[in-house]
Amino acid sequence: MARQPRRIRNGGAKSDARDVARRHDRAYRRARDGPPHPRAERDIDDHYRTVRARVEFRQKIERSEFLGIAFPVSSETEFFAELDAIAKRHFDATHHCWAFRLFEGERARSSDAGEPSGTAGKPILAAIGDLFDVAVIVVRWFGGVKLGTGGLSRAYRETAAETLKRAEIVDRYVYDRVEVIVPFDRLSDAYRLIDPPSVVLAAKDFAEDNVFAFDVRRSLRDAFIRAVTARKLTPR
């Protein structure tokens, strides 16, 4: 973010934005080849896999048509808004069955949406497997031939699984924002804290307090705070 030239309190010297930029660049060059901050053992409670983007898959089974739709989702509110939109778009369908699993709180829900109990929602959820922040909706148009409970379960699970096969699976991390006050004579120490993807520099504010904002993997937050204080920097 561009800022107007200002007085920098650093040993009584005056500076403008160009001086700040020069110090910033020199500190970065010094830190680039310096030793990294202490690394902690990395837990898995802030890491999960999900789908990158929405995908669809369509197939016919015994004259019934099944449309699978998989997409990333981060909350129940977001999911039900999308379910409502899909139900309106495919208003002529017989069933709109679904399942989702969220990372926060490890919440999972599913619905048979009028199909016999246990024949749609649970098979869809089983197909999601160990993915999180993922929803799958399977839309069915009944074709006149009954599939039976076993046939329905296979049809819904297969449609969900085939839909997810077409999705790109990506790793995601949960980050906490940590702000650190950095004196100008400690800029290189601040840059040594950067350790992508575990610690990412999200923003810099060379205002009165010279605040760096770091996004830190949740499982490493305590170790990061220790590394900050060990370098005589101040977290806030």
Image (cartoon, rainbow, N blue to C red):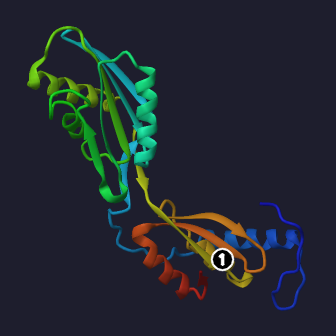
- Identify the residue at image location x=26%, y=36%: 111
Q: Is residue 167 above or below residue 15?
A: above
Percent x, y for residue 35? 53, 75
- Identify the residue at image location x=45%, y=21%: 89
Q: Residue furthest front?
A: 114
- Identify the residue at image location x=85%, y=73%: 19
Q: Of residues 218 and 11, which is closer to you in this image?
A: 218
* Left or right: residue 26 compared with residue 111: right
- For the C terminus, the image quarter is bottom right
- Identify the residue at image location x=62%, y=77%: 180
State which quadrant residue 91 falls in.
Answer: top left
* Left or right: residue 133 compared with residue 210: left
Q: Amino acid at mark 1?
A: Ser
Q: Of residues 229 and 66, which is closer to you in this image?
A: 66
- The residue that label 1 is drawn on is 188
- For the N terminus, the image quarter is bottom right
Q: Is residue 178 above or below residue 164?
A: below
Percent x, y for residue 141? 29, 15
Q: Of residues 26 and 236, which is closer to you in this image?
A: 236
